[in-house]
Image (cartoon, grey):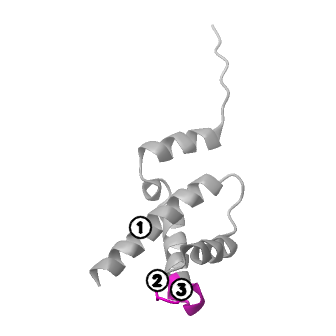
Amino acid sequence: MTATTNYNPIGWANRVIKTHKARSIAPDFYRVVENQVRLAVARDENRLEDGSINWNFVDADCYMAINPTSQCRNLYMELFDEACEAVEKEMEVA
């Protein structure tokens, strides 16, 4: 008896991301993304006139700095979202 399997490592990763936090899947990659988010948030050009963060500019800066491949783009986006949430929560407390 043989079974045919369509092995898709990217599809597997996408399913895991939906059920677990992305940072638990790739903690080293998360640290890189979080560091880039923090650097981008600190830049004056990524602030609006009222002092709030322009998350679109932060997103662009991080994406250009990390330049994720097509195989890890979904993981990158999940990690970016988690890092932004963490930074935002820290800013609310401060």
Which of the 4 image quarters holds residue 45? bottom right
Where residue 20 appears, as percent x and y from the top left, is: 41, 47
Is 3 on the left-hand or right-hand side of 16? Answer: right
Rendered view: 70 above or below 68: above
Please report the bounds of the magenta region as a residue range.
41-52
Task: Compute the Cα span from label 1 to label 2.
Answer: 15 Å
Where residue 34 appears, as percent x and y from the top left, is: 49, 73
Q: Which label is found at residue 85? A: 1
- Dot 2 lies on which element? loop
Name the residue type under label 3: Leu
* Dot 1 alpha-carbon crowd within 10 angstroms: few under 14, some 14 to 19, many 20 or more: few
Tell me the residue at 52%/40% (across/down): 15
Is 17 on the left-hand or right-hand side of 2? Answer: left
Tell me the residue at 42%/53% (across/down): 21
Q: Which residue is mark 2?
A: 52
Q: Which label is found at residue 33? A: none
Residue 47 or 6: which is nearer the viewer? 47
Tell me the residue at 45%/59% (across/down): 23
Which of the 4 image quarters holds residue 8? top right
